[in-house]
Image (spheres, rainbow, N blue to C red):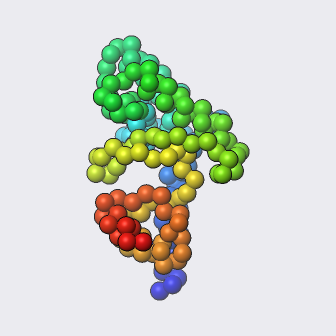
């Protein structure tokens, strides 16, 4: 039973690490670059709806400002319009990633970003994410608590939240 719990926790960590890879893509990286465009990265400011926050998002937001068009993914501060404030927030996210490169987690600067949950709610999160586990079921939360890694859980959905409040 203990081996199954450890195995399940390892699967959760691998899934979390995959999310970190998507969020921490280096523009200088000559390796794989996803051409996905179905907006898996649900961070507001991901204006081009791919897997990365990068200069392409800045370009897209500038285009939207000049054409006076709106898209929720470009509205980084979720105020109902795409404007210079959104452009500044996205540029800050990109710059923050670069300035934090090579720093220990305790030395990294952070900012609050907005993201879309699995239930299509807009929530705040601290960026960068320095922990790796996202919990979407009670079973996974129980496993994390059972193997002593509940302090690494950074996100839950509404199905696990009532249980989290008990601990």
The residue located at (50%, 69%) in the rendering is: 150
The residue located at (47%, 74%) in the rendering is: 145
Whether 25 is drawn above or below 134: the answer is: above
Residue 49 position in % (x across, y down):
40, 35
Residue 144 position in % (x across, y down):
48, 72
Which quarter of the figure is the C terminus placed in? bottom left
Query: How many numbered discs, if any?
Result: 0
Q: Is residue 117 visible to the viewer in this orientation of the structure?
A: yes
Q: Nearer the viewer, residue 46 or 146?
A: 146
Residue 166's image quarter?
Answer: bottom left
Residue 85 position in % (x across, y down):
44, 24
Residue 1 position in % (x across, y down):
47, 86
Whether 124 is drawn above or below 4: the answer is: above
Residue 159's image quarter?
Answer: bottom left
Q: Nearer the viewer, residue 36 or 83?
A: 83
- In the image, 99: left or right of 44? right
The residue located at (68%, 47%) in the rendering is: 107
């Amino acid at each position: 039973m203990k081996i199954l719990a450890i195995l399940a926790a390892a699967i959760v960590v691998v899934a979390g690490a995959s999310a970190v890879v998507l969020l921490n893509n280096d523009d200088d990286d000559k390796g794989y670059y996803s051409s996905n465009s179905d907006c898996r990265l649900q961070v507001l400011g991901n204006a081009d709806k791919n897997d990365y926050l990068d200069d392409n998002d800045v370009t897209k937001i500038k285009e939207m400002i000049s054409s006076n068009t709106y898209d929720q993914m470009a509205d980084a501060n979720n105020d109902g319009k795409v404007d210079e404030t959104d452009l500044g927030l996205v540029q800050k996210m990109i710059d923050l990633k670069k300035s934090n490169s090579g720093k220990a987690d305790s030395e990294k600067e952070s900012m609050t970003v907005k993201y879309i949950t699995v239930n299509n709610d807009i929530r705040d999160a601290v960026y960068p994410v320095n922990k790796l586990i996202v919990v979407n079921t009670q079973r996974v939360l129980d496993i994390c608590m059972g193997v002593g890694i509940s302090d690494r859980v950074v996100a839950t959905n509404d199905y696990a939240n009532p249980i989290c409040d008990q601990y």
